[in-house]
Amino acid sequence: MLVVVGIIAILVSMLVPSFKRSIEMASRTMCMHNLRSVGQALEMYQQDNDGWLPSDGASATVLASSSAPPGWLFKLIPTYLNDPVVFTCPEDPFRFRMLRSRGTVLSPEIADYPSYGLNSFIVTAAGGALADVQRQRPARPLNTILGADMGPDSVLGSGQSPKDRRSGPRRNHSFLTIDDGFNPFAPDASFTWLTTRHGPGINMLTLEGGVRNVRTVEVLNTPIRSYYSECLSGGCTLCLSTQGNMFVQHYSFARDSLFWWTGAFNVFTPSSE
């Protein structure tokens, strides 16, 4: 009997890690599917708005006929995405917030609930001029970041009051900033939206609608700079702007051939974001 128990214990110890990996893989796949659905909704929005992504520059006529709060999220609900579950990642510890908002009246705080964020540089720089991607087309849309998994995935050290923490962390109204002030070497640093939700990384959506898994561990442990040689060689507009003395600090995802913008850089100034 002891031998049988020992064999069972060995089998369990072998199967549990494999089962855990299977669950993680399924969650990552579901997250990629949801993020891809968000990308498709943004594409449909563009088709209906003369090539514009939801932005300050394109919002005037859209909001004139809408009672929803301002923000890209509310321009997709419910016309292009009806079920809030699409905005949730299975591995987001605060996904319940978005799920709980089903059937409720849209309110500004809901903008902090999604598991995903939109590239704020595209939709806010130069008054949102880059959001007219049909005309301001980047050189490498397949490598240009449109959206991604968004944190923080914890409220500890977030700078929020204990009362605010009970509702979960703030997520910058679902906007990914190129440099959110996070300094990994400062003990009092504020929490970044950048996370490691899927093992060592997150899922990212590109302007062409592709979704890929990106390592973020190295990014989180690297001081934010305005210039990276590997980033510049990939066509990063922000690194290129440094050559023209316009220093724009930003996270670099050049390791995975992804960049914040790869098009013309004379339509914005360093203080645009």
Image (cartoon, rainbow, N blue to C red):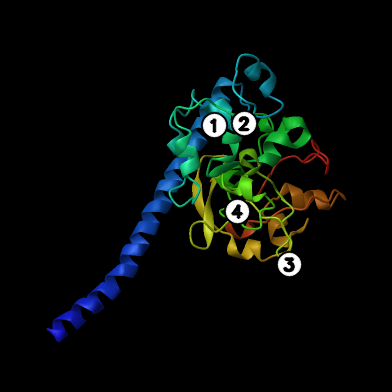
Q: CA distance from mark 1 to mark 4?
A: 29 Å
Q: Which residue is mark 1?
A: 42
Q: How many residues crowd around disc 4 within 10 Å: few (fewer than 14), some, or many (20 or more)?
A: some
Q: Position of residue 142 (x, y in %)?
A: 57, 44
Q: Is residue 35 visible?
A: no
Q: Are marks 3 and 2 in contact (CB under 8 Å)?
A: no
Question: Which SS class for mark 1?
Answer: helix
Q: Which residue is mark 2?
A: 108
Upstream in the sequence, badge 3 or badge 1?
A: 1
Q: How many residues crowd around disc 1 within 10 Å: few (fewer than 14), some, or many (20 or more)?
A: many
Q: CA distance from mark 1 to mark 2?
A: 20 Å
Q: Which residue is mark 4?
A: 155
Which of label 3 and label 1 is nearer to you?
3
Q: Foreground residue, 241 or 213?
A: 213
Disc 2 residue type?
Answer: Pro
Q: Position of residue 255 (x, y in %)?
A: 61, 60
Which of label 1 and label 4 is nearer to you?
4
Which of label 4 and label 3 is nearer to you?
4
Q: Foreground residue, 211 or 136?
A: 211
Name the residue: 46% across, 34% down: 84
Q: Are marks 1 and 4 in contact (CB under 8 Å)?
A: no
Question: Which SS class for mark 2?
Answer: helix
Q: Position of residue 23 (x, y in %)?
A: 35, 57
Q: CA distance from mark 4 to mark 2?
A: 19 Å
Disc 4 residue type?
Answer: Val
Q: Foreground residue, 161 or 175?
A: 161
Upstream in the sequence, badge 4 or badge 2?
A: 2
Horizontal side, residue 95 vs residue 10: left or right: right
